[in-house]
Image: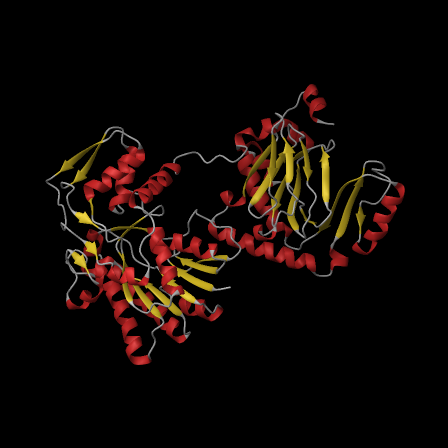
Amino acid sequence: MKKVLITGCNGLVGSYLRDLCLDKGWKVIGVDRNSTKRITTNFNYQFKKIDLLVEQNIIDLFNVEKYDVVFNCFGIKGSPMKAKNNPVDFLYPSFKINTEIINQCYLNDTWLVFVSSVGVYSPAEKFSEDDVWKTLPSESDWFPSWSKRMGELLLESYRVQYGYNKWTIVRPANIFGEYDDFSGSGTLISTMVKKVYESSGEIEAWGDGTPIRDFVYGKDVALSLIKIYERGINDVVNCGSGIEISIKNVIEEIIKASGKDITVKWDPSKPNGDLRRLMDTAKQEIHGIMPETKFSDAIRNVYEYYSSLFEQSIPIIPKENLLTEGAYIGKISDFLEEKEQEDFKKMIAEVEEYSCDDIENRLTCKYNYNDLENQYDHNVLPSKVAERDAWVRKNKFHVWQKWWEFKHPKESYFNKIAIKILKHLYPEAAIALDEVNSQGAMALFEDGHFIDIHNDGANKGRLCVIIFYLSDPSTHNNGGGELRIITGTGKEFTIDPVFDNFCVMDFAKNNIKHEVKMVINGFKRYTYINFITLDDGILESIFPKDVEDKKKKII
């Protein structure tokens, strides 16, 4: 498995690159100073929120892991005005961080894909790779340009002095995509997408719309970076479309994607900028890294993504319906910050490791029989399972649930996360939940383990049960173990027993039927389960039940 480091992993290009590398089955370490709500639950991904201005942090990254490739997507964002007034904010971080990343890649003999910028070029109608060092940057890009140019120059110096040539310099054109800055002060396309989405009839645009630009979709840039590394291309190469698109055409495509009837009011008193800026794509064509996505398709993707940000994200059962349906199904990541999510994944690895050690002392097999519910020991040690199975067969008893249960020394961690989530789902009980002496447990279902469909019995004070699914999705392999529930209104839902999924079944006003399908194909179904119980008087005061309700809900 290849091991990849991506700096700026939450940025416009880094976000695509992270997902594409994970799709290839590579292990990815992503570094950024900013967190993101776009959390990936892939077990091959590790996010590190690190300040790369601290040199030792970069050195530590390389001391801990040996990377096959580093994609250096780090960069300083800001408007031309910010660059003009605060040039140190561009130059100091760029010089310091790029210098040490390049040095560490050389020292560790690691391939480096260095993401530069179209800003390194001097004003021209067409940008050719070999022209950069024959000219000086434009005044508007003066400081940002040098922040990238010096990194390029340093790579060349390592080639000259040390013979280090395991690198590629990539100069993308005007990048756009789903992970852009839509605040209104970002790129042309992200700004116009925001304007069109918010407009009901007319938008304003600067100039007359005639200037020509070269735009490239962020996902295509990321794909090109991967191809460059896989093909071992040691070169300086542009990454553009080579297609001339006017500003007017850009805005028309965005309006078309929106499906709205919008008029554009051009303001000729505002500057047009350079009339023509196009990337020379001759080297791209030679290396086979031309963009794959049509401009119109990419624009539609971006507009639909931006629109989706304002559409309410509703799980299968909205939390508002918890008390009427009797269940909530959701994603753990919806309730955790990125750092919490990383910690959660680490704890899961510990659970799996813990369950495999000293099995005789840590695992008990839970049995239940409809025939002799209270006349036997529910818990059977692993060494006694065969004997118990023989006894069940001999007496022709009906087993209706069977699984391994074990305690974990860090269950308190999962308990804490469970209470945090339940406070969102039961805001009325938030104060009472702080007082709960939560006692969760870990469960492992292996081949042949299951739970028949049933309702739970009457348990005074029981608020709910919360279940976290902890198994790596890649190990499921149609291995069964799904939770099937029938809600209070008769709807049926099935929950895959893999990491990031969780379910809450309500007992405050419900007692829904549910089952766990038999586990097969060698799948190991790890779960954390916690029955939350309040003082019965407190529960009744928060969620009062009438007599008929009790009769109806309790079997």
Is 390 on the left-hand or right-hand side of 271?
right
Q: Quadrant of residue 539?
A: top right
Count of numbered badges drawn on the protein:
0
Determine if residue 35 is in view.
Answer: yes
Determine if residue 116 is in view.
Answer: no
Whole-percent x, y for residue 101 in the image: 36, 68
Residue 106, placed above or below residue 178 = below
Q: Quadrant of residue 195?
A: top left
Residues 504 and 13: in front is 13
Residue displayed at 44% across by 69% down = 62
Specify the farthest residue to the bottom: 161
Residue displayed at 72% across by 43% down = 450
Residues 518 and 324: in front is 518
Whole-percent x, y for residue 364 in the image: 76, 51
Whole-percent x, y for residue 53 in the image: 35, 64
Q: How is the image coloured?
A: secondary structure
Residues 97 and 16: in front is 16
Specify the farthest residue to the left: 269
Q: Quadrant of the C terminus?
A: top right
Whole-percent x, y for residue 236 in the image: 27, 66
Is 202 on the left-hand or right-hand side of 10?
left
Residue displayed at 18% across by 56% down = 84
Is 346 on the left-hand or right-hand side of 225?
right
